[in-house]
Amino acid sequence: MTKTRLVLWDIDHTLVDFTGLGAAWYTAALAAATGTELTTYPDFGGRTERAISSDLLTAHGIEPTEDLLQALWKALIAESERAVGHLPADARALPGAAAALTAFAGHDHVVQSLVTGNLPEISRHKLAAFGLDEHLDLAIGGYGTLSAHRPDLVPHAVAQAAAKHGAPFAADAVVVIGDTPSDVEAALAHGAVAVAVATGHYPAAELRAAGAHTVLPDLADTDAVRSAVLG
């Protein structure tokens, strides 16, 4: 069956909650990659890893060269690999996440992937900890290594999906689901449908003001999620 709808999920505070772990990973990774003690944190919300890492290095007086970014990412991946066995206990899948992913997997015309600020490897670790990777095509996602500008991730994922499935996806057949105004902005910049969930640090009113087509309190109501995505 021809794939006609592309659903692109954010990860953190949309599907899972890893609050607190990122800070520990960055502290260890910065020390491992540069020998520097972490003294200040960058803004994480809705941003890409390339932007976050660049700001982190700059804030500690280090020029964010590509070599240093790669070294920091390698150290971050190592931290997440060390934590894999403990992730189910140290974090949680958000209510309704598994049911929503499973529901769309039952629609033959739907493709599900990611648009996330995370690194590809860390994306897999975070999702696999709760079995949330089963219905997602992680090979065609838009990841935080690509650009410091989050809207750049959406057309990358769309192009990858179109190439894999041999047909283009109309802009209004692409749905971006996330918990921040940046997720909404990334969708709207490319004419995609923006579905926001108020499960992160941004209230529903702020997500609505950013221009989200639909704002949900969470993913717990599978029928509501399905309606927002499929129309």
Image: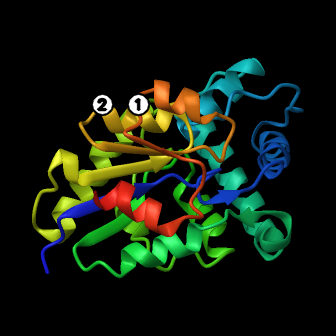
Tell me where residue 1 appears, x and y as whole percent. 14, 81
Q: Residues within 10 Å of mark 2 (few under 14, many from 20)?
A: few
| Relative to 119, 84 lies left or right | right
Tell me where residue 69 appears, x and y as whole percent. 60, 38
Q: Are marks 1 and 2 in contact (CB under 8 Å)?
A: yes
Describe the element under mark 2 as helix, strand or loop. loop
Q: Which residue is mark 1?
A: 185
Q: Residues within 10 Å of mark 1 (few under 14, many from 20)?
A: many
Which residue is rendered at x = 43% and y = 76% of the image? 103
Query: Is the residue 25 above or below the residue 58 in the image?
Result: below
Q: How many marks?
A: 2
Q: Which residue is mark 2?
A: 189
Tell me where residue 55 appears, x and y as whole percent. 65, 24
Q: Nearer the viewer, residue 198 or 120?
A: 198
Tell me where residue 62 appears, x and y as whole percent. 71, 22
Q: Amino acid at mark 2?
A: Ala
